[in-house]
Image: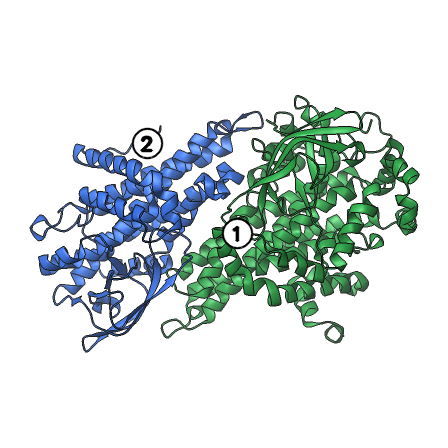
Amino acid sequence: MIGVPWAKESKQYAVLRSNALNFASAELAPVADDLENTVDSPLLWKAVEKAGEMGMLAALVPEQLGGEGVDLYSLCVALEESAVECAGFAAALLFHNAALVPLVYVDRKDLVEEFAKGRPLCTVATAGEVALEDGKLNGSAPFVFNVLEGTVALLFPGSGEGRKAAYVRAGTSGVEAKVDPYPLGWRVSNFATLEMKGAEPVFVLDKSEREAVTATERTLYLGLAAIANGIVRKAFQKAYDYARQRYQAGKLIIEHQAMRLMLARMLCSMEEGRAIIRRACGVEDLGPAIIAWRRAGANACQAAMDGVQIHGGYGYMRDYGMERLMRDAKYCQMFPRPEEEQLLRLLDMAEEGG
Amino acid sequence: MLGQELSETGKRLFRDYPILRMLWESGRKKGLRETIALIEKAEEFNRTFAVPRALELDMRMEREPEYFDWEIMRQACKYRFLSIFIPKQLGGIAGEFMVTNTSLLMDELCSGCSGIALAVGAHSLGVAPVITSGAMAHWDTVLREIVEGELKQQPVTMAYAITEPSAGTDVEEPEYLEKAKLSLEAKKVKGGYVLNGRKCFISDGSEAKYFTVCAALDRNRPLQTWTTFLVERGMEGFSTPRVELKMGQRASHAAELLFEDVFVPESHCLGYEGDGMGNGILMIMAASRGPVGSIATGIARGAFQHFLAWAKSKRNGKRPIEEDRIRMALADMWGMIQENRGLYMSNAMLGDCIFGKALDNPVMNLTLSLPPSLRTNKPMRTFLNSYYGKAMINYILRFYIKDEDMTQLLETASLAKFSCADNAMELCSRALSLMGPEDSEERRWVEKCYRDAKLTQIYEGTNQLNRLVVNNVRFEETLRVEVPRPFKKGVMA
């Protein structure tokens, strides 16, 4: 099997990667299709439990607050490997981990303990418009994953640099979850819009809001880039394997130059993804994280689309496992914010001196 | 003057396709009135039937892939969409602009729901080989049954079966067919043929009553023995055991066809033994790849309409269209749609230039105006099924069809197919990226279009194959359609 041949990592990350891949192969691969068709299934909770045993439920939270205390790149490694088998599950884990990030800034071990249990998973709402007035939350936050009864959702009320970080609990007074039963991708848990009318927050950050919001965003962007890269890898693996067994025009697909070119592009995307994620994890700024997300998301969409194309008709059918990649990849690009909007924000950031 | 004579639909069509206006002003009003009337019907079909149920049906098909909504076909009967390829002399509605009308119809229907549209369109793909093969013995039986069923709103449908489990692209080009790994084989036996093997991903496969099926008589010499058969549901040994769950275009089934010692009588060999590629596939592909371009265009147009509605609606106090980047994107998308229309209309109009005379000429008109009983009595059927009978009909049918015209048609069809499909995919993808994480009905529609559009890059020959066809026809001149001609040595013996 061709992995990501030229991306070199230190032993620490290589070991982590191998463990995470084993987890994905053992716990996610056999149930990925079933996870797609159900929400709140025992299969999901079994996988979440195993992820917890791997330290993936409070990965970024320091040990003294009850977390695992790993660096962001380690979380990215775990997410990329999980996404190879099930991008929806990896996304669910990412939102959960990202939601806990602000708690680090306020030293709230009690809340970490309460939120990080993993059933239900926490989530982050990045879109829509939510306001915090007189201690109550009002507004609407669409495109929220992991929504079940009791889910704790991190919201960013306000706008621009003045955004705050507040948590609400789905199912409590003033918080209504409008479930969309039919999202394009990432189908392992409910996908919903949270409508808030005078909702009482569970907790509102009272200091370091700006840093907390930025750190959460950085986690989301890099985590999504890692998930996107996992999708590229799966698309490559599946397409490469298929191309070596399917004949067209009297020879294996892999021997056709046009197909090799598609596979080669996927190979470049995998390498590129690793490099940009590694680089962005090494700097504290948000800019490189957005750049990595943008590139990896586009690469994942292209790779999944090409992977379907290499499979021909089989690629389009649910039972052959390619089309899910195409649907999941698109959400890596559409979430957490529209791409062009973030592109413009990058220029704003650069003008403000990074 | 133009305004007084034309309906709103007519005005829209003339604005979107100025070439239609030119035809109108050049005196082709009779045919164009039919075109406009057909598109008016398609608009009504979408407005009253397809659009209100598309999202729900798409969702239901995911849970129950084997469900088929027969109301689609009953509604198609109401608007007579099942006989767009059937000549008027046989009771159908194929008019002066048969190919153009088909392309415009598929574009219009797909702007509502391409799954529902495919269920309707794939039927005509099955009908086409019955006509192009000159199998007149079946015109008065199968085609009339379709027309009569349509008038009674009791749909009788067809499907075209080419793809095999180990050969998709390979069975669509002569060069590749020689090397294809085939599953289905037709053995010649006394009085007919026995078919064994499988076909897969056959659109409308689990609903159709009749199938036009391509099979090799000898899997070691597929190109020389590639033959088209008419298979009827109910023939012993024939079944449709599996329906796929597709990513999109779900309202239409993609089914597996299983042949276990299916006996097909000699009379059900459409055309001649061994002319399946020239007579069947290449002629059909030249006529059907353009409409795939129009399917892609319809999907793109549907996505565009929803994206435009989103852009004009208020979101958090302002409308997205107020931003330059959204306005630029809208113009880019409209450009793609107009580019697509130009490409598929070039193919469609060329198709009408070629096929128009084939079906509408004095000899064919005379033949078709004979009372059906004259063609369906036993001696006449025996004659029509004989070598000379088929030769006579094909001679009339293909008298006006030139090889170079068909070759050019194949080139334009392939060009329209891959360009339109790529544009549609890009448009849907871009629209979703621009919308981002939105909770809106428009996003759900565009997501559906995104899933639907991908299939247009795959079926009717992958986009890669179609690119090669354009190269091989235009730049290397290694691919040329040779329409089998009666009495020409070596072709129809």
**Which structural element holds mark 2?**
loop
Q: Nearer the viewer, mark 2 or mark 1?
A: 1
Where's the N terminus of chain A, which quadrant? top left
Across and down, in percent, residue B62 comes to 48, 51
Name the image quarter holding residue A170.
Answer: bottom left
Residue A179: percent from the left, percent from the top? 37, 62
Query: Which residue is more in the foreground, B342 or A3?
Result: A3
Q: Is residue B487 left or right of residue A127?
A: right
Left or right: residue A333 versus residue B248 is left
Whether labels 2 and 1 belong to a single chain: the reply is no
Q: Which residue is mark 1?
A: B452
- The answer to whether B261 is drawn above or below residue B380 in the figure is above
Chain to which mark 2 belongs:
A
Residues at marks 2 and 1 touching, judged by CB atoms closer than 8 Å: no
Three-letter code, disc 1: Asp
Q: Residues within 10 Å of mark 2 (few under 14, many from 20)?
A: few
Which chain hosts label 1? Answer: B
Q: Amino acid at mark 2?
A: Gly
On screen, A139 above or below A299?
A: below
Q: Secondary structure at mark 1?
A: helix
Q: Position of residue A225 (x, y in %)?
A: 30, 47
Give the residue at the far top of this rendering.
B220
Determine if residue B416 is in view. yes
Please tell me the colour of chain A: blue
Q: Residues within 10 Å of mark 1 (few under 14, many from 20)?
A: many
Chain letter of the green region: B
Task: Specify the quadrant of the image occupied by residue B400.
Answer: top right
Which residue is disc 2 drawn over? Answer: A3
